Structure formats: structure tokens, C-alpha cells
Amino acid sequence: MNKVYIDGNVLVKDNAVFYAKSITCNCNNVPKDAEIIKVKNHLFEVNNEFGSLFTDVYIKGGLTGYKNSDVSLSDIDFIYRRFCRKLNLISQLLQQVNGNTEIDILLLQEQYLAVYSLVEYYFCSTLCMSLRQDQRCYDRILKMQHNRTSLRRKDEIAELLNIINRKPHKSRKNKKVSRQEGIINKINSIVFHKNDIVVKLYNTVYGKSFDNDFTLFKGNLLERRHQITHKMGYDEKFKLIDITKSEVQDLILEAQNMCDNVYNKIETVVKKW
């Protein structure tokens, strides 16, 4: 079932989620091969979860959601545009730092971490959106192979494979979810600054090599992130490590270049879908 036609208006109620690959409202013509959902009083209410991330939804009327509801669509371009806009905002905030006081250093640390947080959001969301966007992309995850390298270290890829093979799937709230949502929920919980994990997932989903693309997830840049995140910018000798405005500017530039390169590589794959 790749097409659904709802013969009325749609209301997504509090804490409910409406899933779709795409949504077309005010559609008077029923698309060919679409499943038709008849509704009473011209209103289709979503009280829990409805839809599929691989389904195009056509609605005769309009779509309305309560404050705490959510409509989830597949669109990696939207995620990329949001990343660029947010990174620009961080760059604008950086211009407000003009000194080297303790407050200035704290602001620089927060902006440094904000860049990493945004990058992790971008890569995680892009991957999840791609899994929702095309069945072939999703199928690659189902066929993923993995050899565990250490029993001592937490292996998030092995945990993902356990989720893939487990039935029925349950969310954190102990509610049954579809197989695809169980997988996506797990990916959303993975730490996305671990280079080996991100490379493994991206290589699998997109069928390309990303072995050298995630430059922010290794080396001195990542080490600085750990120092700021876990030790408030102090080294192992409890000495405050200097951080400069130009260092954050360089990080912003590197983040933009890295994500541009990954986006362009992904786009060549997506266009073939």
C-alpha cells in the first residue's frame, strides 16, 4: 500500500503522530491504486499513531494538528536547509564575543558544542529521513552485516541488529511500534559523533564510501569537544584550555564543508531512487 486517500479532513490530536512519505491536501481526485479511507462526519481523527513512512497520503480536505501532535514527513532537503540556517545563527552569535573574559570563554565553549550538536542532528536526521524516503534504502539496513570487535565496548550497531530481528517492536513507552519505526527509534538514540558507527551506517544505507568524510568526528577537534562537554574545558591537569573566536570560526567552516560534501554525495544517490 503506497497510496492512501482520506475522504474528508484530518485532525491529529494531542500526543498523536501522523506518518507519511508525502501529504497532499485539498485533493478532489482519488489517485489511481489508492486505498480509500471513508470517514464519518467528514473528519478523520488520529488519536495515537497512523500511517506509514513509505506511503503518499492524499486528503480530500485539510490537515490540522493539536499543539503536542506531530506530522512526520520524508525530506532530506528540509533537514539540510535547517542545518545551514542554524549554523548561520551560531555564526551570528559568535560575532557578539569580543573579549577574553571568563564569560567570553564560556560563550565560545557553548558555541563550539552547539556546532557539534547541530552536526549530529543533521547526520542522524538525514539518515532517518532517508530510511523513510525509499523502501530500497530501508532494505539495506535490514541486510546490514556486522562483526562485533569487542565484548567490552558498547556495540550500538549490534544493538541495532538486535532491534531489527526482534518482534514485536516496542518504543520507550512500551507501546508496540512498526518494525521500521523500531529501527528508526534505535538510530535516533545512537551517539552520532562516533566516526566508526556513522561511517558504517552511511556506507550501508547509501551504498557509497564515507570512510573519510566525517572529519569532525576524529582528531583534535573531537578531543576538544570531549574536554568541553565532560570537563568544562579543563585538561587532565585541571588547567583551563584556551579557546579562541577564530577556533570556533574554523570549526563552523569545517562543519559547513563537511556537511556540504556529504549532502552532495547523498544527493547523487537519492536522485537515482
Image (cartoon, helix red, strand yellow):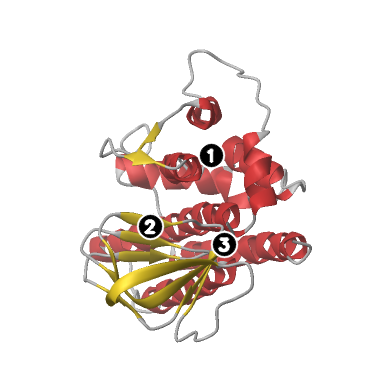
**Mark 3 or mark 2: which comes first in sequence?**
2
The reply, left or right, for residue 219 in relation to residue 92 is right
Q: Amino acid at mark 2?
A: Phe
* Cα gap from disc 2 to disc 1, whole angstroms: 33 Å
Measuring 48% from the left and 30% from the top, which residue is drawn there?
163
- Residue at the disc numbered 1: 194
Q: Indicate the quadrant containing the C terminus: top left, top right, bottom left or bottom right.
A: bottom right
Classify 229 as above or below 103.
above
Q: Disc 1 on helix, strand or loop? A: loop
Measuring 67% from the left and 33% from the top, which residue is drawn there?
144
Q: Disc 3 on helix, strand or loop? A: helix
Classify 236 as above or below 81.
above
The reply, left or right, for residue 77 in relation to residue 43 is right
The reply, left or right, for residue 149 in relation to residue 261 is left
| Neighbourhood count class around disc 2 (C-alpha, 10 Å): few under 14, some 14–19, many 20 upward | some
Which x, y percent locates residue 223? 49, 41
- Residue at the disc numbered 2: 50
- Residue at the disc numbered 3: 255
Viewer-nearest of discs 3 and 1: 1
Q: Nearer the viewer, residue 42 or 273?
A: 42
| Quadrant assignment, res 26 | bottom left
Q: Are marks 2 and 1 in contact (CB under 8 Å)?
A: no
Q: Are marks 3 and 1 in contact (CB under 8 Å)?
A: no
| Neighbourhood count class around disc 3 (C-alpha, 10 Å): few under 14, some 14–19, many 20 upward | many
| Neighbourhood count class around disc 1 (C-alpha, 10 Å): few under 14, some 14–19, many 20 upward | some
